[in-house]
């Protein structure tokens, strides 16, 4: 009986929210689009619980649909996700046991909104309410490793993921490699290859593959620069070319560039590449 009496009230809440949204859209449609969006989303996190009238799960579902629509619209337009964090906060505050918004936050915020910090913050909330979900631990660790370059924090979250029910076997090997605290590029590449092989999202796979190429390029730069430094110390001058490093025995070979370019030596003694010259940090911070 109690459930039957509650059902009409749930319908009323949904209709009330629909009426508010309809009224808001009609009232502010004359304003510029950016102003409309600011008026529409600005109070959403603060007042979501208030307008739910206790039916937080119902409102969470409605806001979740709105979050997906909002994200889709901005992905195909300006790629400005100003209110995405507010929407995700509102949904997960209303229903903190709702798995999909957490997974969405851990994927969209770092990749599309370039916001790994808020992704980590929302994922840490998920771990308080859904501690047995291995994927949320894994996702948090991945963001620490890939976007923050913090292998120590990543190791903690991968280790926790490895203890959860139904976790895949590759999580265990990731945790072991990171916990070993190895600082070399080869280990970073092996870890990323494992993640790449277990990732289905083509967008994410492309990013990971590029990261692997960047690490390979960085390793090549360092290999050549170390040989160049030895040459300068012993010969007291710069080599005429990279080939002289090979001829004098300081370098076994000129490594192959993963981006298809060629390495060369500038007149002032710097190693450059015809295709790619961005440098990255691949080692753990001491």
Image (tube, rainbow, N blue to C red):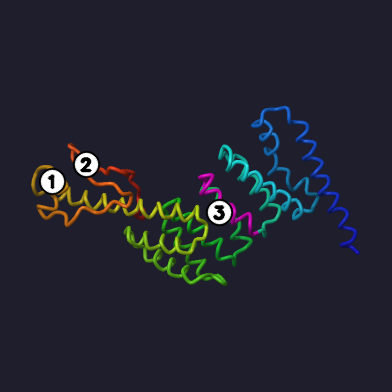
Q: Which residue is mark 1?
A: 232
Q: Is residue 209 above or below residue 169?
A: above
Q: How many marks?
A: 3
Circle number at residue 270: 2
Q: Earlier in the sequence, mark 2 or mark 3?
A: 3
Q: Pointers 2 and 3 in contact (CB under 8 A)?
A: no
- In the image, residue 23 lies at what x, y percent? 80, 36
Q: Nearer the viewer, mark 2 or mark 1?
A: 2
Q: Please rate how many residues cluster around mark 3, counting C-alpha atoms within 10 Å: few if below 14, some from 14 to 19, many from 20.
A: many
Query: Where does the magenta region start and end?
Result: 99-115
**Which quadrant: the N terminus?**
bottom right
Q: Pointers 1 and 3 in contact (CB under 8 A)?
A: no
Q: Disc 2 and disc 3: Cα gap in Å? A: 39 Å
Residue 153 found in image quarter: bottom left
- In the image, residue 253 lies at what x, y percent? 19, 55
> Is residue 101 magenta-colored?
yes
> Which residue does the image show at 35% across and 62% down from the upper left?
187
> Which residue does the image show at 56% across and 72% down from the upper left?
166
Q: Secondary structure at mark 3?
A: helix
In the picture, measured across the screen, residue 154 lies left or right of residue 118, that is: left
In the picture, measured across the screen, residue 73 lies left or right of residue 252, that is: right
Q: Which residue is mark 3?
A: 106
Q: Disc 1 and disc 3: Cα gap in Å? A: 47 Å
In the picture, measured across the screen, residue 172 lies left or right of residue 128, that is: left
Q: Please rate how many residues cluster around mark 1, counting C-alpha atoms within 10 Å: few if below 14, some from 14 to 19, many from 20.
A: few
Q: Secondary structure at mark 1?
A: helix
Residue 283 found in image quarter: bottom left
Q: Earlier in the sequence, mark 1 or mark 3?
A: 3
- In the image, residue 223 lies at what x, y percent? 23, 53
| Residue lying farthest to the front in this orientation | 260
Q: Secondary structure at mark 2?
A: loop
- In the image, residue 74 lies at what x, y percent? 60, 41
């Amino acid at each position: 009986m109690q459930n039957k009496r509650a059902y009409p009230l749930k319908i009323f809440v949904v209709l009330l929210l629909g009426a508010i949204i309809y009224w808001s859209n009609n009232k502010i449609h004359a304003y510029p689009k950016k102003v409309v969006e600011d008026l529409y989303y600005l109070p959403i996190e603060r007042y979501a619980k208030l307008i739910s009238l206790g039916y937080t799960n119902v409102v969470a579902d409605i806001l979740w649909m709105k979050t997906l629509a909002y994200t889709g619209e901005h992905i195909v337009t300006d790629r400005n996700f100003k209110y995405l964090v507010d929407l995700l906060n509102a949904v997960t505050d209303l229903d903190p046991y709702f798995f999909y918004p957490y997974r969405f936050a851990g994927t969209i915020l770092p990749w599309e909104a370039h916001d790994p910090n808020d992704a980590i913050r929302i994922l840490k909330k998920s771990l308080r309410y859904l501690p047995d979900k291995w994927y949320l631990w894994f996702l948090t660790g991945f963001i620490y490793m890939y976007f923050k370059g913090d292998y120590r924090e990543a190791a903690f979250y991968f280790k926790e993921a490895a203890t959860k029910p139904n976790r895949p076997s590759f999580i265990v090997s990731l945790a072991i490699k990171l916990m070993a605290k190895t600082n070399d590029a080869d280990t970073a590449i092996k870890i990323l290859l494992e993640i790449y092989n277990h990732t289905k999202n083509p967008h994410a796979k492309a990013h990971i593959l590029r990261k692997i190429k960047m690490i390979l390029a960085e390793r090549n730069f360092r290999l050549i620069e170390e040989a160049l430094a030895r040459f300068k110390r012993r010969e007291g001058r710069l080599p005429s070319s990279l080939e002289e490093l090979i001829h004098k025995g300081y370098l076994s070979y000129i490594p192959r560039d993963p981006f298809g370019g060629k390495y060369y030596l500038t007149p002032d003694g710097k190693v450059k590449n015809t295709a790619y010259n961005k440098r990255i940090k691949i080692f753990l911070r001491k």
